Amino acid sequence: MFLERTLNLPNLLKKKSFFLFGPRATGKSSLIKESFATDPSPPLVIDLLQSELYLRLSTSPEQLASMIMAHADHSIVIIDEIQRIPALLNEVHRLIEAYDIHFLLTGSSARKLRHGSANLLAGRARQAEIFPLTYIEIPSFDLAHYLTYGGLPIVHLSDEPIEDLHAYVDTYLKEEIQSEAIVRKLSGFTRFLQFSAITSGQLLNFANIANDAGVPASTVREYYQILEDTFIGFSVPAWTKSVKRKAISTTKFYFFDLGVRNTLAGIKVLEPMSDLYGQAFKHFIALELRAYISYRRKHWALSYWQSKNGQEVDFIMEDEIAIEVKTTTHVQDKHLKGLKALAEENICKRYFLLSRDTIERKVGNIEIVHWEVFLDRLWNGSGLF
């Protein structure tokens, strides 16, 4: 079963070549297959997971040109898992310049590209990302199911999501970490993964994580960078433009998928109105906002605000929209304190409180909206901006 995705690859590739990054099992291969299924001149696909092809091109990258020229009717060339042979990017660079070929270069890890002095094509290729399934991509969206099992397509469509999540985590540890020899001691990294998942969405505290995982704080910093390089997590920086109330500057870190986060953290049940449920709900909104910004090519910063006095707002989108997230079914004045404090700065254009309260209303300049209504308007472009 294929679920229609938001990311439109043919439209992207009309203008330029693209890197398409994303964690494994987010649906890159399925999206590519479906995107060009009816194309009279389908792209040439070079899959570097094929052993024979990998060995040939890793020893002789220059053979890429002859492979492509043998299929001259293809205006688009897809190279899957490009990070396996970074040297191919020199050939890709040359072929873009010489023949105006549009490449789609996919990968589940950017570590070898970012840290290995790879040719990143100097503006000749843009970057896009694919994420787990979003609210708008899932028919009959079930919030409780999503908060528990996340949005990986193979998990969402599975009859045994818990089994598939555990298999995914084990595969990630073995294939992404061990095979690339990223870390020396897998046991320390495994402990770090557990504690970083438990604290996902909270302020980063390297010292506390280091104590819990039994590794130096400097190693913890490197481990977080590994998670970002392999697209397993992302940072949400602090918004520090407030003047009336000085803001803290510590970054928050979120895992890319709620199901993976819960599996690593050992979270099996989310009781409604519990702290864990509230954390998961806020995490879900973070994932939606991040995917929206990327898929709609907004190039906006996603941040959060917290004053040193304790007032806070969960998310700020490029000085445009401030968003506070609550699980309550009955919004009260106490839930608006952070947004009211931020509004005094007079910087953001709109202020939203998202919750499970079904009565839409406005208190001052704060709009109280049910989370589903907000996401429908966001994804459908219904007057939020």
Image (spheres, rainbow, N blue to C red):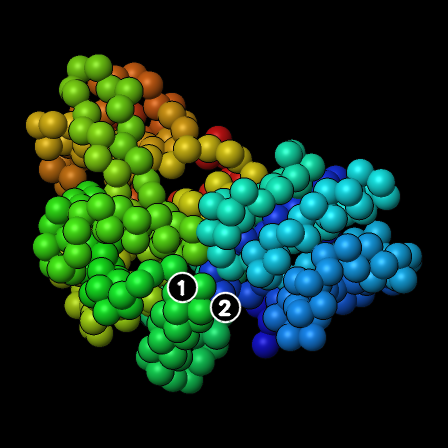
Residue beneath the point at 41% across and 45% down: 289
What number is the disc on residue 181? 1
Nearest the viewer among 317 and 215 is: 215
Residue type marked 2: Ala
Q: Are marks 2 and 1 in contact (CB under 8 Å)?
A: no
Nearest the viewer among 87 and 282 is: 87
What number is the disc on residue 328? none
Callout count: 2
Residue beneath the point at 48% across and 41% down: 293
Give neighbour class at mark 1: few <14, some 14-19, many 20+ (Cα, 10 Å).
few
Horizontal side of 295 relative to 212 (left or right) equals right
Residue beneath the point at 31% across and 35% down: 237
Give neighbour class at mark 2: few <14, some 14-19, many 20+ (Cα, 10 Å).
some
Report the quarter where the N terminus lies. Answer: bottom right
Residue beneath the point at 22% across and 15% down: 243
Residue 271 % position (x, y) = 17, 68
Above-or-below relation of 359 to 145: above
Q: Helix, strand, or loop for circle 2?
A: loop
Q: Helix, strand, or loop for circle 1?
A: loop
Residue type marked 1: Ala
Q: What residue did someone put label 2 on?
A: 25
Above-or-below relation of 314 to 169: above
Above-or-below relation of 264 to 283: below
Horizontal side of 376 relative to 102 (left or right) equals left
Whether residue 385 appears in this view of the structure is yes
**Residue 82, quarter of picture:** bottom right
* Comes first in the chain, label 2 or label 1: 2
Nearest the viewer among 111 and 39 is: 111
